[in-house]
Amino acid sequence: MTSITTLLLPAVSQSGTRPTECEPRSNPIAQLNDCDLAVAIDVLRATSVIVKALASGAESVMTCETIEQAHRLAESEPDRTLLCGERNCQKVDGFALGNSPSEYTSENVHGKRLVLTTTNGTKAIEMASPVPSLAIASFLNLSAVISRILRARHTCIICAGTNGVITSEDVLLAGALVTGIKNVCKAAQFDDASEISASFWESSMNLDPKDSDQSIALQLADRLQRTEGGRNLIGVGYENDLLACSQINSLPILPMRKAVSPSCFELDDSAR
Ligand code: MLT
């Protein structure tokens, strides 16, 4: 039996710490303790970038919350490590790459070890530390993530949001995942946040079963313009990233966490 819980924000627990066994079941964060799989979502743009980087041949992507941690993580193998990430949507001074999928070409990242820090996405990843397995989700690898969720007992989908606020681009992807699970697994169980996400996805998109992934991508890019993350990116000149992050199922790979503290992602072995 598959069951899905969705956290619309990567809030910390009421005590301000990571969830612990003794926290009440009613605290949604404590539900992470019951999960065998977490799925991290930051559509615009951290998780889309991780998918693009590994699809372009990066060896691994290590994630961390601060710029200082990123510099420390790069120290061990400076020659083949790229510092990557953003603050206020812009590349961090002195870093090799920012947070635009367009930068993560094979030419730039093939064979490299990446260290990535972003404002919100890498926090959602850290929140999933207690969960045994963590997959990275974007629209680019939607079906690959759905297949992985179907093999799990209890999945927690974690939406990154922006600076503590729910963002609709992340809820749209959570809803697309939940809708995809519903389509193939009638017995799956969903909490209310998952149901709300699915309703939001279905009502936001005018989908026909005959639509190609390409036509869904165009419609989705248009929809992303009316999201918090979309407006922020348009405001700083990254509107092309909305279409880049909307390319449904264009990169059918699955980044899985291979190490915790720091979190380090590689392609899932079965996807190599
Ligand atoms: C984040 O982690 O907040 C985002 O990925 C921001 C961005 O795309 O610039």
Image (cartoon, grey):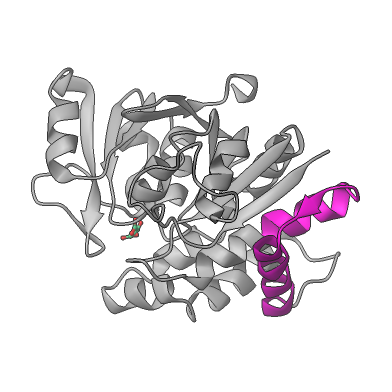
244 or 27: which is nearer to us? 27
> Going 39% across and 42% down the picture, which residue do you hit?
18
Which quadrant of the structure image shows residue 172? bottom right
- Left or right for 84, reference 148: left
Q: Residue 199 in magenta? A: yes
Residue 226 visible in the shown view = yes
Residue 58 appears anywhere in the view: no
Q: Kindly report the secondary structure that dominates the magenta region of the rendered protein.
A: helix
State the quadrant of the C terminus: top right
Indicate the quadrant where residue 248 lies.
bottom right
User: Which of the 4 image quarters holds residue 35?
Assistant: top right
Q: Is residue 10 left or right of residue 116?
A: right
Image mark count: 0
The picture places residue 135, in percent across and down from the top left corner, at 55, 37
Residue 219's spot in the image, x, y percent? 63, 74
**Is residue 18 depicted above or below 72 in this figure?**
below
Comparing 97 with 10, the one in front is 10
| Residue 54 screen position, x and y as percent | 45, 33
Residue at 60%, 70% in the rendered image: 220
Q: Nearer the viewer, residue 113 or 24?
A: 24
Give the image quadrant in which the ligand numbered 1 is located.
Answer: bottom left
Furthest residue toward bottom? 226
Q: Which residues are magenta?
A: 176-205
